[in-house]
Image (cartoon, grey):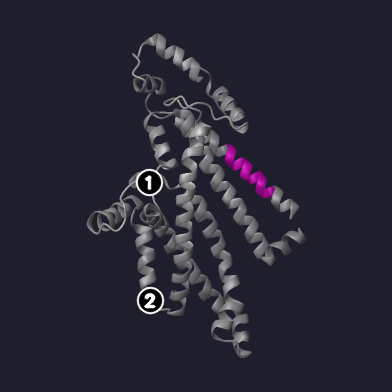
């Protein structure tokens, strides 16, 4: 396992380096001048002297390579600098916003797992019938309807018309319902369809036929022979879904005015706040790459074929 883990970790580190450098360049190519945006936000006159002094203070007068090395070395020490807009430490602001995003992603993850797997199981048990078709419709809706549109529809129906749930913000447990369902719906469809397909594939395997010959049927056949091998491909999708929820909740958070990383990131983009944008990109990348590595480890432990091949190598 040592060589496999080293290869996976090395690939993760290279991915982080490539993404941070590419995002660093793309952020610098954004239209607009962060110095002027900062001066206007601070209600200071935009003069040549003030702009030059602030540019030096922000480190924007250095070459791009020097700026990147300076930023990366500080980030590795946990120092992400000061926000251009608020002039507060970015690490302190992240500590405020990221837990809210983590809570929303965790709630959405629980909804996706708690609804997606049962729908996939029901679709498998009722293949070709009404319940199977209903699961297909749910999957199509989640895959085709944009999250922001779905969020506004939910707000209009369940908050404005029916008044079942509060509309915006995060002040009670009821505020979690609509944003978590909105964020989870696309993953419910993919998890349910993949689980159904995996169960159907395993049901056609010779070992299942042998089990039926031995008199094993129904729940015993499902629990003892189908579930574990059918869940293995789902593990990858489920694990990556958590990383996607954490890094892809920007739109949903802005629709529901959720005080998380999405709102923080969008505000930083509007203000050309380079350090905040770069920190958010780094954090999202670390979360996604770290989740992928964790999924690989779980899959390694679940799949004996991979361990056997690694042992041979």
Q: Is residue 123 magenta?
A: no
Residue 249 position in % (x across, y down): 43, 48
- Quadrant where the C terminus sits is bottom right
Q: Residue furthest right?
A: 312
Q: Residue furthest top?
A: 49
Up-down: is 99 above or below 273?
below
Q: At x 56% / y 27%, what residue is drawn?
A: 71
Q: Position of residue 298 (x, y in %)?
A: 63, 59
Residue pictured at 45% horizontal, 62% vertical: 190
The secondary structure that most of the magenta stretch takes on is: helix
| Label of residue 131 in the image | 2
**Numbered label attached to residue 42:** none
Identify whether 263 is placed above or below 102: above
Magenta span includes 16: yes
- Which segment is the magenta one? 7-17
Distance of mark 2 from mark 1, alpha carbons?
Answer: 31 Å
Q: Which residue is mark 1?
A: 251
In the displayed structure, does residue 165 sit left or right of residue 20?
Answer: left
Picture coordinates of residue 216 (x, y %)?
A: 60, 87
Q: Secondary structure at mark 1?
A: helix
At x 61%, y 53%, the residue is: 294
Q: Is mark 2 in CB contact (under 8 Å) with mark 1?
A: no
- Give above or below for 141 relative to 20: below
Residue 245, can we see it? Answer: no
Q: Nearer the viewer, residue 222 or 159?
A: 159
In the rendered image, which quarter is residue 204 located in? bottom right
């Amino acid at each position: 396992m040592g060589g496999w883990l080293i290869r996976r970790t090395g690939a993760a580190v290279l991915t982080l380096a490539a993404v941070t450098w590419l995002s660093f360049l793309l952020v610098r190519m954004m239209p607009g001048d962060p110095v002027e945006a900062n001066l206007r936000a601070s209600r200071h006159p935009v003069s040549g002297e003030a702009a030059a002094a602030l540019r030096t203070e922000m480190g924007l007068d250095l070459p791009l390579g020097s700026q990147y090395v300076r930023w990366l070395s500080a980030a590795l020490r946990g120092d992400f600098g000061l926000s251009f807009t608020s002039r507060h430490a970015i690490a302190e602001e992240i500590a405020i916003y990221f837990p809210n995003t983590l809570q929303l992603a965790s709630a959405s993850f629980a909804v996706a797992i708690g609804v997606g797997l049962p729908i996939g199981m029901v679709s498998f048990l009722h293949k070709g019938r009404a319940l199977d078709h209903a699961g297909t419709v749910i999957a199509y809706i989640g895959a085709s309807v944009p999250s922001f549109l779905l969020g506004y529809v939910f707000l209009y129906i369940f908050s404005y018309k029916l008044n079942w749930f509060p509309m915006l913000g995060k002040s009670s447990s009821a505020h979690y319902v609509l944003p978590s369902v909105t964020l989870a719906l696309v993953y419910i469809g993919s998890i349910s369809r993949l689980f159904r397909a995996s169960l159907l594939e395993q049901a056609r395997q010779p070992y299942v036929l042998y089990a039926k010959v031995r008199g094993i049927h129904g729940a015993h056949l499902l629990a003892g022979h189908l579930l574990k091998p059918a869940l293995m491909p789902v593990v990858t999708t489920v694990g990556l879904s958590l990383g996607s929820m954490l890094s892809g909740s920007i739109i949903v958070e802005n629709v529901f005015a959720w005080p998380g990383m999405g709102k923080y990131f969008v505000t930083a983009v509007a203000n050309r706040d380079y350090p905040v944008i770069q920190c958010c990109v780094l954090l999202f990348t670390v979360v996604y790459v770290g989740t992928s590595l964790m999924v690989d480890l779980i899959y390694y432990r679940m799949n004996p074929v991979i361990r056997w091949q690694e042992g041979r190598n």
